[in-house]
Amino acid sequence: MSLVLDSAAQDLLFREARTANSFTDEPVTEEQVQAIYDLVKYGPTAFNQTPLRITLVRSAEARERLVQHMAEGNQAKTAAAPLVAILSADNEFHEELPALFPAFPQAKDLFFSERAARENAAGLNAALQAAYFIVGVRAAGLAAGPMTGFDFEGVRKEFLDDDHTPLMVVNIGKPGPDAWYPRSPRLEFDQVITTV
Ligand SMILES: Cc1cc2nc3c(=O)[nH]c(=O)nc-3n(C[C@H](O)[C@H](O)[C@H](O)COP(=O)(O)O)c2cc1C
């Protein structure tokens, strides 16, 4: 009653949206990925730094290389998903910052001249963007299967470089048969929210 988003959209994005572990063969198109990105790019980040980078793993050869770095329990679904995305944080996001945050171009040198500060900020803000991305996948009528069960250093070396830190690998597609485990409970309001 208090939410202005209509009930069907609430279901699509959250209540009925599930983490998929199997997928149909229906392809995920470039147009769908473009539409997802063009929606979720508006999610907020500190100084608008937008450090998330997304590597779409489309070729069979690249998929094979990725699967080898996945934890055993994640391999079959990563091999079979219509689309797999590697989400990473760009630790050199500050190069873009004067253009992305023209209201305060000094932020680049003032706050982000040190690599450690950039890694810290990129980790938090790219993780926020990863969450927006998962919700965007759902908004496209697709299911996401995010995974952190993989060899991070292996994936970084195989697909990225020293300036990028892998965050998660996400399987994307229409859910297949027996796509999810039973829904696990969530914490209730009183367990999470305190008011001071
Ligand atoms: C960041 C992240 C990492 C995850 N890593 C894995 C993983 O490596 N393997 C796996 O099977 N599920 C993984 N999951 C799936 C979660 O267990 C699942 O999203 C959660 O239990 C909620 O499930 P539900 O959406 O079906 O309610 C991951 C989810 C997230 C968000």
Image (tube, rainbow, N blue to C red):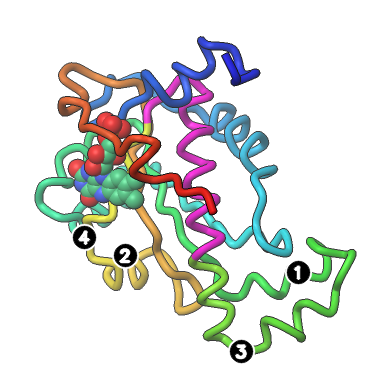
The dot on residue 69 is: 4
Relative image position of residue 39 (x, y in whole percent):
65, 34
Name above or below for residue 80 compared with residue 114: above
Three-letter residue code for mark 1: Leu
Real-space CA distance between mark 3 and mark 4, rounded to the nearest whole angstrom = 30 Å
Residue type at mark 2: give it.
Val
First reached walking from the N terminus: tag 3 or tag 4: 4
Disc 1 element? helix
Residue lying furthest left: 72
Q: State the image coordinates of residue 104 (x, y, percent, origin top left).
A: 86, 71
Quadrant in which the C terminus is drawn: bottom right
Asked if the residue at tag 1 contacts the one at tag 2, i.e. Cβ–Cβ closer than 8 Å, the answer is no
Mark drawn on residue 114:
3
* 3D distance between C-alphas at marks 4 and 1: 32 Å
* Marks 2 and 4 in Cβ contact (< 8 Å): yes
Dot placed on the residue nearer the N-terminal end, 4 or 1: 4
**Marks 2/4: CA–CA distance:** 6 Å
Q: Amino acid at mark 3?
A: Glu
Task: Read off the residue under disc 2.
Answer: 155
Mark on residue 97?
A: 1
Residue at 33% from the left image edge and 39% from the top image edge:
171
Look at the image and say whether residue 131 sits in the magenta stretch.
Answer: yes
